[in-house]
Protein backbone atom coordinates (compact mmCIF):
# COMPACT_ATOMS: atom_id res chain seq x y z
CA UNK A 1 0.00 0.00 0.00
CA UNK A 2 2.58 2.58 1.09
CA UNK A 3 4.78 1.57 -1.83
CA UNK A 4 2.04 2.55 -4.27
CA UNK A 5 1.53 5.90 -2.59
CA UNK A 6 5.28 6.57 -2.56
CA UNK A 7 5.53 5.66 -6.25
CA UNK A 8 2.72 8.07 -7.10
CA UNK A 9 4.28 10.92 -5.11
CA UNK A 10 7.71 10.26 -6.62
CA UNK A 11 6.18 10.44 -10.10
CA UNK A 12 4.46 13.69 -9.15
CA UNK A 13 7.79 15.17 -8.08
CA UNK A 14 9.39 14.14 -11.36
CA UNK A 15 6.60 15.03 -13.79
CA UNK A 16 4.44 17.60 -12.04
CA UNK A 17 1.40 15.36 -12.49
CA UNK A 18 -0.54 15.59 -9.20
CA UNK A 19 -1.71 12.64 -7.15
CA UNK A 20 -5.47 12.05 -6.97
CA UNK A 21 -7.12 11.63 -3.54
CA UNK A 22 -6.39 8.23 -2.03
CA UNK A 23 -9.13 5.63 -1.95
CA UNK A 24 -9.96 3.80 1.26
CA UNK A 25 -7.65 0.92 0.39
CA UNK A 26 -4.63 3.25 0.12
CA UNK A 27 -5.47 5.80 2.82
CA UNK A 28 -2.62 6.57 5.22
CA UNK A 29 -3.49 5.77 8.82
CA UNK A 30 -1.31 8.16 10.80
CA UNK A 31 1.81 10.30 11.00
CA UNK A 32 4.17 7.31 11.16
CA UNK A 33 2.75 6.04 7.86
CA UNK A 34 3.12 9.48 6.27
CA UNK A 35 6.74 9.80 7.36
CA UNK A 36 7.48 6.27 6.11
CA UNK A 37 6.08 7.18 2.70
CA UNK A 38 8.24 10.32 2.63
CA UNK A 39 11.33 8.19 3.30
CA UNK A 40 10.38 5.85 0.47
CA UNK A 41 9.90 8.81 -1.90
CA UNK A 42 13.41 10.02 -1.08
CA UNK A 43 14.79 6.59 -1.93
CA UNK A 44 12.86 6.38 -5.19
CA UNK A 45 14.07 9.81 -6.27
CA UNK A 46 17.64 9.12 -5.05
CA UNK A 47 17.65 12.50 -3.28
CA UNK A 48 20.08 13.39 -0.50
CA UNK A 49 18.61 15.82 2.05
CA UNK A 50 20.71 18.77 3.22
CA UNK A 51 18.82 19.14 6.48
CA UNK A 52 15.39 19.20 8.10
CA UNK A 53 12.42 21.54 7.71
CA UNK A 54 10.09 21.96 10.69
CA UNK A 55 6.85 23.93 10.93
CA UNK A 56 5.11 25.47 13.92
CA UNK A 57 2.11 23.22 13.23
CA UNK A 58 4.28 20.16 13.87
CA UNK A 59 5.06 18.96 10.37
CA UNK A 60 8.58 17.68 9.69
CA UNK A 61 10.18 17.00 6.34
CA UNK A 62 13.49 16.63 4.58
CA UNK A 63 15.08 19.80 3.19
CA UNK A 64 16.43 19.33 -0.33
CA UNK A 65 19.29 21.48 -1.67
CA UNK A 66 17.60 21.94 -5.05
CA UNK A 67 14.69 23.64 -3.28
CA UNK A 68 16.74 26.47 -1.79
CA UNK A 69 16.90 29.56 -3.96
CA UNK A 70 18.40 33.02 -3.63
CA UNK A 71 16.23 35.99 -2.81
CA UNK A 72 14.92 38.09 -5.67
CA UNK A 73 14.64 35.47 -8.37
CA UNK A 74 11.37 35.08 -10.31
CA UNK A 75 9.42 31.87 -9.79
CA UNK A 76 6.38 30.67 -11.74
CA UNK A 77 3.31 30.50 -9.53
CA UNK A 78 2.36 27.31 -11.40
CA UNK A 79 5.33 25.64 -9.69
CA UNK A 80 3.50 26.04 -6.37
CA UNK A 81 0.17 24.17 -6.55
CA UNK A 82 -1.90 24.99 -3.45
CA UNK A 83 0.89 27.46 -2.69
CA UNK A 84 1.33 29.16 0.67
CA UNK A 85 3.90 31.77 1.69
CA UNK A 86 5.19 31.95 5.26
CA UNK A 87 8.03 33.59 7.18
CA UNK A 88 10.93 31.25 7.85
CA UNK A 89 14.52 31.11 9.04
CA UNK A 90 17.29 28.92 7.64
CA UNK A 91 19.96 28.06 10.20
CA UNK A 92 23.32 26.58 9.14
CA UNK A 93 24.96 24.31 11.70
CA UNK A 94 28.45 25.16 12.98
CA UNK A 95 28.35 22.03 15.14
CA UNK A 96 27.03 18.58 14.37
CA UNK A 97 23.84 17.33 15.99
CA UNK A 98 24.40 13.86 17.41
CA UNK A 99 21.85 11.38 18.79
CA UNK A 100 23.53 11.38 22.19
CA UNK A 101 23.90 15.17 22.46
CA UNK A 102 21.99 17.31 24.93
CA UNK A 103 23.12 20.89 24.29
CA UNK A 104 21.86 23.07 21.47
CA UNK A 105 24.36 23.27 18.58
CA UNK A 106 26.16 26.47 17.64
CA UNK A 107 25.09 28.04 14.36
CA UNK A 108 27.41 29.30 11.63
CA UNK A 109 24.86 31.78 10.32
CA UNK A 110 21.19 32.53 10.10
CA UNK A 111 19.34 33.49 6.92
CA UNK A 112 16.05 35.36 6.61
CA UNK A 113 13.84 33.04 4.59
CA UNK A 114 10.53 32.85 2.81
CA UNK A 115 8.89 29.43 2.82
CA UNK A 116 6.84 28.82 -0.33
CA UNK A 117 4.95 25.62 0.37
CA UNK A 118 3.24 23.50 -2.28
CA UNK A 119 1.46 20.18 -2.62
CA UNK A 120 1.74 17.24 -4.96
CA UNK A 121 -1.78 16.14 -3.94
CA UNK A 122 -4.29 17.21 -6.61
CA UNK A 123 -6.76 18.57 -4.06
CA UNK A 124 -4.20 19.36 -1.39
CA UNK A 125 -3.44 17.01 1.53
CA UNK A 126 -6.49 15.51 3.20
CA UNK A 127 -4.77 15.42 6.60
CA UNK A 128 -1.46 16.04 8.36
CA UNK A 129 0.00 12.65 7.48
CA UNK A 130 -0.64 13.15 3.77
CA UNK A 131 1.20 16.45 4.12
CA UNK A 132 4.06 14.67 5.90
CA UNK A 133 4.25 12.08 3.11
CA UNK A 134 4.75 14.95 0.66
CA UNK A 135 7.85 16.28 2.47
CA UNK A 136 5.65 18.45 4.71
CA UNK A 137 4.49 20.44 1.69
CA UNK A 138 7.96 21.46 0.55
CA UNK A 139 7.97 23.91 -2.34
CA UNK A 140 10.87 26.37 -2.28
CA UNK A 141 12.75 28.14 0.50
CA UNK A 142 13.93 31.57 -0.61
CA UNK A 143 16.82 32.93 1.47
CA UNK A 144 18.43 36.31 1.95
CA UNK A 145 21.97 37.08 3.04
CA UNK A 146 23.11 35.18 6.12
CA UNK A 147 24.46 36.80 9.28
CA UNK A 148 26.02 35.52 12.51
CA UNK A 149 23.29 33.80 14.44
CA UNK A 150 21.13 36.03 16.64
CA UNK A 151 17.45 35.26 16.91
CA UNK A 152 15.29 38.12 15.57
CA UNK A 153 12.35 39.20 17.68
CA UNK A 154 9.99 40.47 14.97
CA UNK A 155 9.02 39.73 11.38
CA UNK A 156 6.58 40.96 8.74
CA UNK A 157 5.25 39.25 5.62
CA UNK A 158 4.03 41.47 2.79
CA UNK A 159 2.35 40.78 -0.55
CA UNK A 160 2.94 43.28 -3.34
CA UNK A 161 3.84 46.81 -2.26
CA UNK A 162 1.74 46.82 0.90
CA UNK A 163 3.62 47.75 4.05
CA UNK A 164 2.97 45.43 6.97
CA UNK A 165 3.85 46.12 10.57
CA UNK A 166 6.40 43.70 12.04
CA UNK A 167 4.98 41.48 14.77
CA UNK A 168 6.75 39.68 17.62
CA UNK A 169 7.80 36.07 17.04
CA UNK A 170 9.21 33.34 19.28
CA UNK A 171 11.52 31.08 17.30
CA UNK A 172 13.73 29.62 20.03
CA UNK A 173 11.18 26.90 20.86
CA UNK A 174 10.88 25.95 17.19
CA UNK A 175 14.66 25.72 16.92
CA UNK A 176 14.79 23.46 19.97
CA UNK A 177 12.08 21.25 18.47
CA UNK A 178 14.01 21.01 15.19
CA UNK A 179 17.18 19.99 17.01
CA UNK A 180 15.28 17.27 18.86
CA UNK A 181 13.81 15.99 15.59
CA UNK A 182 17.32 15.88 14.10
CA UNK A 183 18.63 13.91 17.09
CA UNK A 184 15.82 11.38 16.85
CA UNK A 185 16.52 11.00 13.12
CA UNK A 186 20.19 10.14 13.78
CA UNK A 187 21.77 13.59 13.75
CA UNK A 188 23.02 16.11 11.21
CA UNK A 189 26.58 17.10 10.20
CA UNK A 190 28.27 20.48 10.31
CA UNK A 191 26.95 22.57 7.40
CA UNK A 192 23.51 20.98 7.37
CA UNK A 193 20.50 23.25 7.67
CA UNK A 194 17.44 23.57 9.87
CA UNK A 195 14.54 25.41 8.26
CA UNK A 196 12.09 26.87 10.77
CA UNK A 197 8.71 27.72 9.24
CA UNK A 198 6.14 29.96 10.91
CA UNK A 199 3.25 28.41 9.02
CA UNK A 200 0.78 29.92 11.46
CA UNK A 201 1.39 33.16 9.55
CA UNK A 202 1.11 31.62 6.09
CA UNK A 203 -0.95 33.31 3.38
CA UNK A 204 -2.04 31.96 -0.02
CA UNK A 205 0.62 32.48 -2.69
CA UNK A 206 -0.52 34.83 -5.46
CA UNK A 207 0.88 36.57 -8.51
CA UNK A 208 3.21 39.41 -7.60
CA UNK A 209 5.95 40.06 -5.10
CA UNK A 210 6.12 38.52 -1.66
CA UNK A 211 8.64 39.68 0.94
CA UNK A 212 9.48 38.68 4.49
CA UNK A 213 11.37 41.12 6.69
CA UNK A 214 13.07 39.97 9.89
CA UNK A 215 13.97 42.86 12.17
CA UNK A 216 17.74 43.04 12.61
CA UNK A 217 18.38 40.15 10.22
CA UNK A 218 17.21 41.17 6.76
CA UNK A 219 14.74 40.25 4.05
CA UNK A 220 13.94 37.47 1.60
CA UNK A 221 11.93 38.21 -1.53
CA UNK A 222 10.37 36.27 -4.40
CA UNK A 223 8.62 37.43 -7.55
CA UNK A 224 5.79 35.03 -8.38
CA UNK A 225 4.96 35.21 -12.07
Image: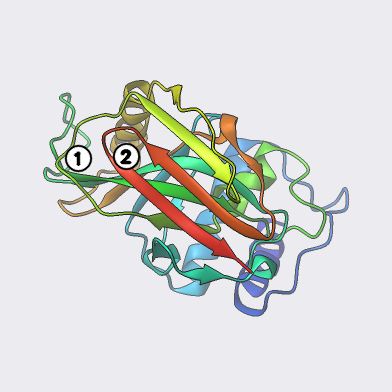
- Give left or right: position of 57 versus 51: right
Q: Which mark is on residue 135?
A: none
Image point (17%, 24%), residue name = 102
Write down the quadrant of residue 200 in the picture: top right
Image point (46%, 28%), residue name = 166
Q: How far apart are marks 1 and 2 (CA)?
A: 7 Å
Residue 203 screen position, x and y as percent? 65, 41
Q: Is residue 61 visible?
A: no
- Give left or right: position of 224 versus 109: right
Q: Is residue 216 above or below residue 92?
A: above
Q: In this view, does 173 lie above or below 2?
A: above
What kind of element bears circle 1?
A: loop
What's the image's color scheme? rainbow
Residue at the spot of label 1 = 97
Residue at the extreme right of the image, as rendered? 23
Write down the quadrant of residue 201 in the picture: top right
Residue at the extreme bottom of the image, as rendered? 15
Image point (50%, 59%), residue name = 222
Of residue 100 and residue 21, the one placed in the foreground of this image is 21
Going from N to C along the chain, the mark reached first, 1 or 2, is 1
Q: In which quarter of the image is the N terminus?
A: bottom right
Residue 88 screen position, x and y as percent? 43, 41
Q: Do the residues labelled 1 and 2 touch (CB within 8 Å)?
A: yes
Residue at the spot of label 2 = 182
For the residue carrying disc 2, how many other residues have a C-alpha within 10 Å: few (<14), some (14-19), or many (20+)?
A: many
Residue 197 screen position, x and y as percent? 47, 39
Write down the quadrant of residue 145 in the picture: bottom left
What kind of element bears circle 2?
A: helix
Q: In this view, does 212 lie above or below 180?
A: below
- Give left or right: position of 213 versus 208: left
Residue 132 screen position, x and y as percent? 59, 45
Q: Is residue 105 above or below residue 82?
A: above
Amino acid sequence: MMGSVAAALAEAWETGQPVAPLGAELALTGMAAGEAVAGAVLEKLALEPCGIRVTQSGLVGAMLPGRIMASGKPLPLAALPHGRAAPALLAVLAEAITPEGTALPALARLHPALDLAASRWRDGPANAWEAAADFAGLGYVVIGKGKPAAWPANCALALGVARVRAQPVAVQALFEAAVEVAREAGGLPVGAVLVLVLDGRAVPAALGDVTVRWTGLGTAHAALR
